[in-house]
């Protein structure tokens, strides 16, 4: 069947200028990490929920697959068309309005294409806080954050995107609109449908808007950098931070020495803190956001670090003296992925293990990989506060990165993911499954869980047109 009738129908819905079929479409057809290059029938850019619904109905009638896409910053190839040239990329970036704010209810309703940083700044202008924060916040969208249940650096206090969402507006696979934009914090009226769509990566329907939680802005916001003698010491420091700071602990990041050395090598303009350069195997970045006075918050923060020094789980520490200095510390942490890319192609893992078991996991897996692949370099960093590590593997010094990936990626993944399973963890903490990890889901997820997932997919998307091959492999 010729696709032209469908394309004409789509042009009549969103306008001819917003049905892209010619020119360079790689911004929509290639994933952010450039792992996959697809070929779309068209990129369709609706401007309203009504237009999304009409597009979905037209595609359902034609039996044409849809790939919902936000800022296209995902790391698991979850928003990339296949190479058949038959799928529609549904780009939601024109749906970027902030519809309403309810200051008394501490909620904001935004469309799926709203850039995360835009929402952060909007909340700040109203004297409030939207706490979701991640490296791609200048280009990722709220819909994408919800579709992947994004995490970031403040999960230890505020939770993943799932915990920040109170309601959704969704276009179903049949082109119907579910109006679920409640700002209610208590609503026990049957199944909580929003949780089906959050984290489903566009495989069950299209998230078009959401009602999100806001929070009072903290009075004091303090950042510290600490060198620690081991991963076990970092976990002990985490326990002390919970004990001394309670709910005001908002961030707790760990960085291995080799990861920091890459920042120092490739980004010499950044001043890696002194403690990192004194041979400590790990450094920790702590953030404390308090509703009390800055003086009182600083006293508590410094008391924590003094206690940690006495306990021997911190070798040295510095507290940022200004907002600018705190941003410099965070910039070092956020530059690790870019520095690793400058070093060469690498094998990335986004894994989670209970914080209490991370030291044993790291010791076991470090030894396993260095034994199996002599000279391999381990770039270990991430959100220790919530048990999420970016446990990445770099080729031995001087080796060709492309050859290393081609020859070793499958083997390294199996070694790492088997170790994660052995320690009761997850192979995907915050990046999602996408197309990249469907086989891992089949290998590590219990059969009964897979059966329930397939039953949900069949019930909500019986035609199988919503992002086929993402999360669940194609039948």
Image: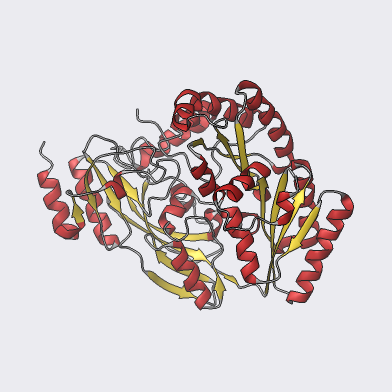
Q: Nearer the viewer, residue 395 or 238?
A: 395
Quarter of the image with the C terminus is top left
Residue drawn at (51%, 69%) of the image:
107
Q: Quadrant of residue 245?
A: bottom right
Residue drawn at (51%, 33%) of the image:
449
From this view, report whether residue 329 is shown above or below residue 282: below
Q: Nearer the viewer, residue 2 or 420?
A: 420
Task: Please give the count of numbered marks on the rendered protein.
Answer: 0
**Residue 104, percent from left and from top:** 54, 77
Using the rendered image of the protein, determine whether residue 52 is visible from the camera's viewpoint: yes
Q: Quadrant of residue 396?
A: top right
**Residue 73, percent from left and from top:** 42, 50
From this view, report whether residue 236 is shown above or below residue 433: below
Task: Indicate the colouring scheme.
Answer: secondary structure
The outermost residue toward the top is 372
**Residue 465, percent from left and from top:** 29, 40
Image check: 110 left or right of 360? left
Residue drawn at (42%, 73%) of the image:
100
The outermost residue toward the right is 310
Using the rendered image of the protein, determine whether residue 173 is visible from the camera's viewpoint: no
Image check: 319 left or right of 412? right
Quarter of the image with the N terminus is top left
**Residue 135, percent from left and from top:** 51, 55
Q: Nearer the viewer, residue 242 or 281?
A: 281
Q: Nearer the viewer, residue 73 or 127?
A: 73
Residue drawn at (58%, 47%) of the image:
265
Image check: 163 left or right of 364? left
């Amino acid at each position: 069947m010729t696709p032209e009738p469908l394309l004409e129908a789509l042009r009549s819905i969103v306008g001819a200028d917003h049905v892209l079929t010619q020119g360079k479409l790689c911004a929509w057809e290639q994933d952010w990490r450039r792992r996959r290059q697809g070929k779309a029938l068209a990129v369709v850019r609706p401007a309203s929920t009504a237009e999304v619904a009409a597009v979905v109905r037209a595609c359902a009638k034609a039996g044409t697959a849809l790939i919902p896409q936000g800022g296209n910053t995902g790391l698991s190839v979850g928003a990339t068309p296949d190479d058949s040239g038959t799928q529609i990329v549904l780009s939601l970036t024109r749906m970027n309005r902030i519809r309403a704010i309810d200051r008394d209810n501490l909620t904001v309703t935004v469309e799926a294409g709203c850039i995360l940083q835009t929402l952060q700044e909007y909340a700040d202008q109203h004297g409030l806080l939207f706490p979701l924060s991640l490296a791609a916040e200048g280009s990722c969208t709220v819909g994408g954050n919800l579709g992947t249940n994004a995490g970031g650096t403040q999960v230890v206090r505020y939770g993943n995107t799932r915990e920040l969402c109170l309601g959704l507006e969704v276009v179903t696979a049949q082109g119907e609109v579910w109006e679920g934009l409640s700002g209610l914090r208590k609503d026990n009226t049957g199944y909580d449908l929003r949780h089906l769509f959050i984290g489903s990566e566009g495989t069950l329907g299209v998230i078009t808007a959401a009602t999100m939680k806001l929070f009072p802005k903290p009075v004091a916001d303090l950042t510290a950098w600490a060198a620690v003698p081991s991963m076990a010491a970092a976990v002990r420091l985490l326990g002390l931070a919970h004990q001394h700071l309670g709910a005001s602990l908002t961030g707790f990041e760990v960085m291995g020495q080799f990861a920091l050395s890459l920042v120092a090598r490739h980004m010499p303009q950044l001043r890696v803190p002194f403690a990192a350069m004194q041979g400590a195997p790990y450094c920790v970045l702590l953030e404390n956001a308090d509703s009390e006075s800055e003086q009182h918050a600083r006293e508590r923060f410094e008391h924590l670090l003094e206690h940690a020094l006495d306990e021997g789980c911190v070798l040295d520490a510095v507290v940022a003296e200004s907002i600018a200095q705190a941003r410099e510390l965070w910039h070092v942490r956020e530059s690790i992925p870019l520095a690793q890319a400058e070093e060469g192609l690498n094998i990335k893992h986004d894994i989670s293990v209970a914080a209490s078991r991370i030291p044993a996991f790291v010791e076991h897996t470090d030894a396993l990989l260095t034994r199996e692949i002599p000279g391999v370099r381990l770039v270990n960093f991430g959100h220790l506060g919530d048990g999420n590590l970016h446990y990445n593997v770099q080729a031995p010094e001087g080796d060709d990165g492309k050859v290393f990936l081609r020859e070793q990626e499958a083997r390294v993944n199996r070694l790492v993911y088997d170790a994660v399973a052995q320690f009761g963890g997850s192979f995907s903490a915050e990046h999602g499954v996408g197309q990249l990890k469907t086989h891992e889901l089949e290998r590590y997820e219990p059969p009964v869980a897979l059966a329930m997932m397939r039953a949900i997919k069949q019930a909500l998307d019986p035609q199988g047109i919503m992002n086929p091959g993402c999360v669940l492999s194609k039948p």
